[in-house]
Image (cartoon, rainbow, N blue to C red):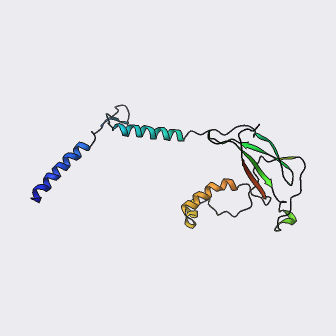
Amino acid sequence: MQAQDGPKRSSDHRHYQQQQQPPAAEVSNCGTCNRTFVQHASFPPASVSVTVWLWLLCCCSFVVVPARAGPPRYSSRIVETKSGAIRGVILELNSKHLEPVEVFKAVPYATPPTGNLRFEAPKKLSPWTGTKLADTYGPVCPQSFPDISNRTAALLSMPKGRYQHLKRLLPLLANQSEDCLTLNIYVPGSGKFT
């Protein structure tokens, strides 16, 4: 009894598989060039719509919103600190859902630890007169960075993920100085800057 059921199920199963397979596409070669064209390929309708949406998504992901060209847009607000007045810049975010933010770049919080102040505790900052424009990032504190110029040699001493992370960080660590006791302050904006 089992021997008869086995082949029958197998035959039904093959018939089901043949019904589920899509019709084969016709492939033809162009006579004047070495390109191959697929003709009459049929896809289920859901598959086509998913393919189109994925294609559109890929195309949209390469659209880059250009950065604002020209000089920075300064905030109308001047903030008084214990050391003096500062004016930041308005950072427009590339999203219609996010409001601009006010950024105060490289605001000093202590006297630079250079010269005879090197290796000393931070000293109180001397006040300044006028308004300091906080529109440029300050230098990065000196850091020891592993040699990643030779990828093969670097990967012998670190995981691939760390190597890739360090490679992304390298441009950000180009401007190093001991005069680095500054803060970058980001303040949520109301969108009503002049």
Q: In this view, does 155 lie to the left or right of 2?
A: right
Q: Quadrant of residue 167?
A: bottom right
Quadrant of res 127: bottom right
Q: How far across and down, in percent of the image, does residue 132 sit?
A: 84, 47
| Observer-nearest of 14 and 33 | 14
Outermost top residue: 32
Question: Of residues 193 and 44, which is closer to you in this image?
Answer: 193
| Closer to us: 146 or 56 | 56
Left or right placement of residue 72 versus residue 123 in this view? left
**Camera-nearest residue between 143 and 53:** 53
Left or right: 164, with 9 as reference point = right
Q: Position of residue 159 (x, y in %)?
A: 55, 64
Point out the image quarter for the N terminus. bottom left
Residue at position x 64%, y 56% in the image: 169
- Image coordinates for residue 83, horizontal then vertical, percent: 86, 54
Left/right placement of residue 88 relative to residue 116 reads left
